[in-house]
Image (spheres, rainbow, N blue to C red):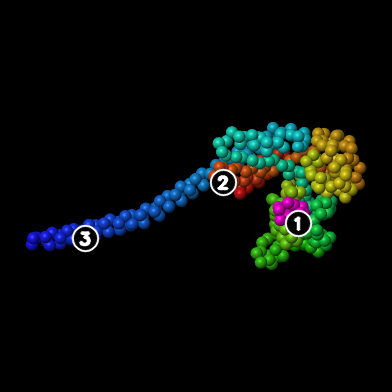
Amino acid sequence: MSREPEVSAVTKVLKDRKGLVLLLVLSAVALFMALVVPFTADQFTDLELANNFKDSLQCQYLGDAGVEAAVSILAQDNRAYDADDEDWAKFSEALLMSSSYLDGMRITGEISDECAKLNLNALVRQQGGQWVPDQFRIEQFKKLFTVLGIEISETDLNDLCDALVDWLDGDDEISGTGGAESEYYQSLEQPYQAKNRPMDTPEEILLVKGMRDNKQWFYGTFEEDGSVKDKGLRDYITCGPIDQRVNLNTASLEVLESLSKDIDESMAESFIACRPIKTMNAMETCKAGLNTIADYTKLQDMVDIKSSRFCVTVAGSMPSGAVLNVRAILDVNKKPQIVYYRMY
């Protein structure tokens, strides 16, 4: 009878030790989990980053492949004329068909004619070793504002043209009352230099005095549902070599109207009905009667029925939602060459 209390004491001690061991084990497990959970999270993050990088890289390959396909199509193009009835104009359909062979991946895009637009770089030209405004081209640029219905006063439009001439020419002399050279741009809150050479992209016009504070002239305005309220210049201007010509086969109604003060909407529509114009003789006999306008001789020097530059836009996308866009400008005077390339 006297040993029973001793047994109870031993049992109590053993139980206390088991509780201590359990506490130690639980503490070790908690410490282990505290180390493992962040490590696992880091592993998942690294894995996600790796997958994102892989998808973006594959999107880039898709974009590059689309541009190369466009180069191949334009290399085989009939150089006698360029119009919407040719293979390059069906590029989007070819990409759509190609996407059907890709496992979940998608490639879309189009080839558009840069010569279907008015060339901003042609607003100035060299004469006798000096830069001078090309008044004929400037009047076309002004009429484009009228045709598009852009709200701008005559004074603001004249000032914008002066500022554009100063941005493009190779000197630091201010043109007209609205001109601006580096002195003006250096006085801005975020200063920069006047370019004083041809533009590389139409978006550069947003840096020019007058346009920089009226971006709606470039982008247009939109309704709440996203539909176009007022058109902007963006889809009707380009930046190419000064001698780049407007392709009458692909120019829009608005651009055709802007080519001369004597061309109205009905004449432009009649000319579009004649397209495609496959020879210069056919253009002369087109029922639209462009050859009857007063400044037809000047117009002849800046229009053609074929193109020298095309724009390729391609988007590559993955099932994960990753998307990458490519925009390239191709010069096709000899063989297709990339003169501008951007990924975004």
Which residue corresponds to the image point at 43% horizontal and 52% vertical from the top-left? 41
Q: Quadrant of residue 170?
A: bottom right
Question: Foreground residue, 289 or 97?
Answer: 97
* Residue 233 colored in magenta in the image: yes
CA gap, disc 2 and disc 1: 32 Å
Residue that extends furthest to the left in the rendered view of this protein? 2
From where the camera sits, is residue 118 visible?
A: yes
Q: From the viewer's perspective, is 137 left or right of 335?
A: right
**Dot 1 and dot 3 residues touching (CB under 8 Å):** no
- Choose the circle earlier in sequence order: 2 or 1: 1
Residue 75: x and y, percent?
A: 68, 34
Which residue corresponds to the image point at 49% horizontal and 49% vertical from the top-left? 49
Q: Of the numbered discs in the image, which one, if any, rests on residue 322? A: 2
| Crowd rating for badge 2 (residues with CA inside 10 Å; few <14, some 14–19, many 20+) | some
**Of marks 1 and 3, the one in the foreground:** 3
Q: Which residue is mark 3?
A: 16
Which residue corresponds to the image point at 85% horizontal and 40% vertical from the top-left? 271
The segment highlighted magenta reads 217-234
Question: Foreground residue, 142 or 102?
Answer: 102
CA gap, disc 2 and disc 3: 59 Å
Which residue corresponds to the image point at 74% horizontal and 49% vertical from the top-left? 235
Element under disc 2? loop
Q: Amino acid at mark 2?
A: Ala
**Dot 2 and dot 1 residues touching (CB under 8 Å):** no
Q: Which residue is mark 1?
A: 217
Q: Amino acid at mark 1?
A: Trp
Q: Of the numbered discs in the image, which one, if any, rests on residue 97? A: none
**Of marks 2 and 3, the one in the foreground:** 3
Element under disc 3? helix
CA gap, disc 1 and disc 3: 84 Å
**Dot 2 and dot 3 residues touching (CB under 8 Å):** no
